[in-house]
Image: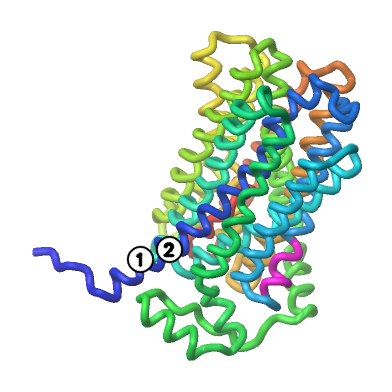
């Protein structure tokens, strides 16, 4: 006979729902702002707005991803000072106001400034939101909750396509960016109802406040660290990634992440334009954005569920968990095949299926790189290893939009999908070699993987 949930458990579930719901909406607006540029880009190029050319458009796409790199790197330090809640509100305000700059821009320089500032806000929001939902996730459900959160990013991509379809032709491209200013109205709601991070309260010595909140809502209180690592400790953790033969594994992870995020952001920026170059109408090209992001939603839920399940071991007596890197390698291969097939003009139904599956595999493949690094790292070094792998990948995120623009500017648009497919194959090779090498080594950790956003 099943027992009814305790009042504490019910309250904990309601708090988790509140935190995840608010963070989900914030990440939805993050995804809308990120993808809106790619959705309106075909129109900007066709109308030669600001005298925009393909190579300049690629540069503009890289400005936002460079801003995301800056925002992601600064997020941890700023959050440690002002709190994760205030940082999230600040990021929403920043990328909303930056979209207003884009909407009123009268030159490429002003538009580029707006996209760079938006990128800083976007890059700071995502890791902070992931940290927030991790604090308040029900026990044992952290990975699937983060996977659920990341569906919001792809839902924002879907929304961006519809905003472009509904507004760009009848009203103009500026209207699409004015829509991206609307999250500014959400910032006061976030400030009013989102609780502060439990990890932040514990770190700041506000233990009584944290314990009261955790007890009230039946959530697990994060463990207090005896001492905060200083600069020397962080430097030691980084150096440890290169000691002995570890430097090979570290470089393999970094190279795989570089190729993966090059592929993610290259496709996100140029998919509608490249599909237009393949002969599809603008409406159809934007529909591919919707289908691609639907695949991304499915892929993130699958990755979240897989990360919450026990990982098989190759050898009896406990070997290295190898599921994540092998899945990542296989899925990068499938992604490369899907991206390459997009360069072939197929029947619409077949193209839609390929775009959907590419969305499923691509985003989850990148996520599994981070899961692999988390599995292979010891507890003291895990945050450094995952953080630097993500950071190196961000350079690929900057390079991807630029690469697509250069190929189109040179009249080699047909090579766009091929170039992105080669990036997927390179990530497959690097993470595959890392998987083989890792299987031969004694594991440093048998803990389950941390699910980290592919973005």
Locate residue 199, reporting x and y percent: 55, 76
Total numbered labels: 2
Residue 1 — which label? none
Q: Give the range drawn in magenta.
A: 73-79
- Closer-to-camera residue (419/87): 87
Q: Left or right? Give the position of 429 relative to 144.
A: right
Q: In this view, does 79 lie above or below 126?
A: below
Per the picture, the main secondary structure of the magenta-coloured stretch is: helix
Res 249 visible: no
Q: Left or right? Give the position of 129 relative to 251.
A: left
Q: Mark 1 points at which residue?
A: 14
* Magenta run includes residue 74: yes
Callout 2: helix, strand or loop? helix
Q: In this view, does 335 lie above or below 30?
A: above
- Closer-to-camera residue (336/56): 56
- Closer-to-camera residue (444/141): 141
Callout 1: helix, strand or loop? helix
Q: Residue at x 79, y 58 (%)?
A: 70
Q: Mark 2 points at which residue?
A: 18
Asked if disc 2 and disc 1 are in contact, CB closer than 8 Å, the reply is yes
Res 351 visible: yes
Q: Is residue 211 above or below residue 186?
A: below
Q: Which residue is drawn at 79% across and 29% down?
A: 404
Residue density around tag 1, few if under 14, some if 14–19, many if 20 or more, within 10 Å: few
Marks 2/1: CA–CA distance: 6 Å
- Closer-to-camera residue (362/241): 362
Locate residue 130, reporting x and y percent: 56, 60
Q: In this view, does 222 lie above or below 59?
A: below
Locate residue 193, reporting x and y percent: 49, 68
Q: Which residue is drawn at 60% across and 31% down?
A: 161
Residue density around tag 2, few if under 14, some if 14–19, many if 20 or more, within 10 Å: some
């Amino acid at each position: 006979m099943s027992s009814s949930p305790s009042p504490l458990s019910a309250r904990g579930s309601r708090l988790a729902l509140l935190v995840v719901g608010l963070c989900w909406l914030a990440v939805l607006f993050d995804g809308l702002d990120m993808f809106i540029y790619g959705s309106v880009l075909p129109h900007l190029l066709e109308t030669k707005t600001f005298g925009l050319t393909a190579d300049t458009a690629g540069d503009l796409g890289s400005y936002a991803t460079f801003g995301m790199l800056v925002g992601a790197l600064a997020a941890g330090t700023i959050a440690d000072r002002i709190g994760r809640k205030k940082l999230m509100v600040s990021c929403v305000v920043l990328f909303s106001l930056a979209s207003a700059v884009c909407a009123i821009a009268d030159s490429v320089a002003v538009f580029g400034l707006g996209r760079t500032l938006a990128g800083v806000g976007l890059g700071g929001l995502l890791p902070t939101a992931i940290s927030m939902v991790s604090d308040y996730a029900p026990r044992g459900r952290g990975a699937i909750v983060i996977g659920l959160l990341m569906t919001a990013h792809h839902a924002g991509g879907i929304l961006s396509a519809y905003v472009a379809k509904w507004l760009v032709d009848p009203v103009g491209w500026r209207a699409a960016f004015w829509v991206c200013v609307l999250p500014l109205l959400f910032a006061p709601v976030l400030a009013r109802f989102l609780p502060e991070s439990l990890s932040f309260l514990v770190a700041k010595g506000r233990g009584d406040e944290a314990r009261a909140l955790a007890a009230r809502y039946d959530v697990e209180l994060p463990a207090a660290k005896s001492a905060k690592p200083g600069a020397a400790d962080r430097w030691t953790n980084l150096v440890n990634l290169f000691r002995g033969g570890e430097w090979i594994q570290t470089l393999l992870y970094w190279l795989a992440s570089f190729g993966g995020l090059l592929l993610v952001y290259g496709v996100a920026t140029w998919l509608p334009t490249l599909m237009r170059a393949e002969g599809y109408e603008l409406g159809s090209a934007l529909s591919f954005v919707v289908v691609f992001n639907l695949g991304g939603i499915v892929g993130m839920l699958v990755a979240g569920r897989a990360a919450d399940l026990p990982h098989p071991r190759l050898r009896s007596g406990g070997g290295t968990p190898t599921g994540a890197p092998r899945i990542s390698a296989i899925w990068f291969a499938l992604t490369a095949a899907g991206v390459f097939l997009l360069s072939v003009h197929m029947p619409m139904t077949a193209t839609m299926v390929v775009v959907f599956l590419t969305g499923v595999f691509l985003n989850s493949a990148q996520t599994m790189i981070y899961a692999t690094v988390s599995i292979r790292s010891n507890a003291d070094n895990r945050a450094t290893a995952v953080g630097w792998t993500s950071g190196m990948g961000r350079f690929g995120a900057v390079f991807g939009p630029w690469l697509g623009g250069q190929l189109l500017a040179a009249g080699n648009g047909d090579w766009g999908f091929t170039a992105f497919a080669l990036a997927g194959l390179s990530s497959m090779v690097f993470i595959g070699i890392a998987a083989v090498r890792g299987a031969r080594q004694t594991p440093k950790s048998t803990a389950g993987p941390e699910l980290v956003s592919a973005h």
